[in-house]
Amino acid sequence: MAHSGVVPAGKRKEIYKYIAPWPLYSMNWSVRPDKRFRLALGSFVEEYNNKVQIVSLDEDSSEFTAKSTFDHPYPTTKIMWIPDSKGIFPDLLATSGDYLRVWRAGEPDTRLECVLNNNKNSDFCAPLTSFDWNEVDPNLVGTSSIDTTCTIWGLETGQVMGRVNLVSGHVKTQLIAHDKEVYDIAFSRAGGGRDMFASVGADGSVRMFDLRHLEHSTIIYEDPAHTPLLRLAWNKQDPNYLATIAMDASRLNNHRACVNGIAWAPHSSCHICTAGDDHQALIWDIQQMPRAIEDPILAYTAAEGEVNQIQWGATQPDWIAICYNKSLEILRV
């Protein structure tokens, strides 16, 4: 896919690339309608000092430019923009690492709004592996931690008063979710989309919780070999489907190395994209399930590196974003 820098009128590029100053791991599409091709990127440097960068595609020049860069302690395990497709809430994004942090995006200055730490009485913090921001109620955020727990936070968003911080948060509930480390958490669209969430962890199980009945959980899947499950993703259209990744696994046959990321299509219940250490991003049509899915319908190879992150734009269903090494690429599908 060789492309010249000049795009002829009426001919859009199929792929745009941005090279960051550091290796990338976490990445997320902004969902605001007025910020179409905006993404947040998190560096992966194995030391305390890391960065988050907000980049935006200039559709006239066909170039990505950095709009804001700010310091972050340790690499971010996940970055997520507030799921606010109407642009009603402040322009917020959150990051997980040692703690959950909520930031207010600006150009060029992004401000830290609050640090949410549930471990007040100890110098030790149990790092957060992931989090999810509730789409139906953006005042709810759930985090997962290596200390076997999930925490549901309630956010309060006030009016902007001068330089006073806009966002504060409190713990709504904390629960022991698994027997070992919890690696991911995701709210489900089932039952109204506010109260149900699932988690996966090192014990190899997927567990389902309901905020209205936290006294019990349901194990909805257990890996036969108890292989740790690292990621989970709910189908965006059909809440009966969820996908999970097992450690060092490549269940979908075409990946020749372990899978690092999964993303369901935002606009279709039967398409899912996977990315892995074999440099590939593959899109699958799962309509034939439970029959085995033999081949992907679309394959893209990143020549230079293992793909460690994949995101399908919720407001840009034609575009998939991937990260490998220091590169971000968005691919038109």
Image: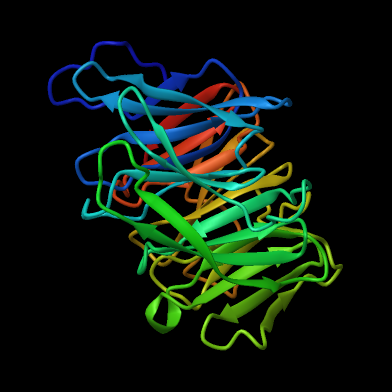
Q: Is residue 293 visible?
A: no
Foreground: 270 or 313? 313
Q: Tell me: 212 left or right of 314.
A: right
Q: Quadrant of residue 194?
A: bottom left
Please identify the quadrant where the C terminus is shown. Answer: top left
Which residue is rendered at x = 31% and y = 45% of the image? 318
Residue 231, image x and y in percent? Answer: 64, 56
Q: Whole-percent x and y of residue 311? A: 47, 45
**Quarter placement of the N terminus:** top left
Does residue 202 sit above or below 115 in this rendering?
below
Query: Residue at (30%, 25%) from the top-left corner?
Result: 107
- Would you identify the image quadrant in which residue 64 lies? top left
**Residue 293 drawn above or below residue 256:** below
Q: Position of residue 287 (x, y in %)?
A: 47, 69
Rendered location of residue 206, percent (x, y): 68, 72
**Who's the residue at 60% across and 38% down the image?**
76
Q: Is residue 124 above or below residue 270?
A: above
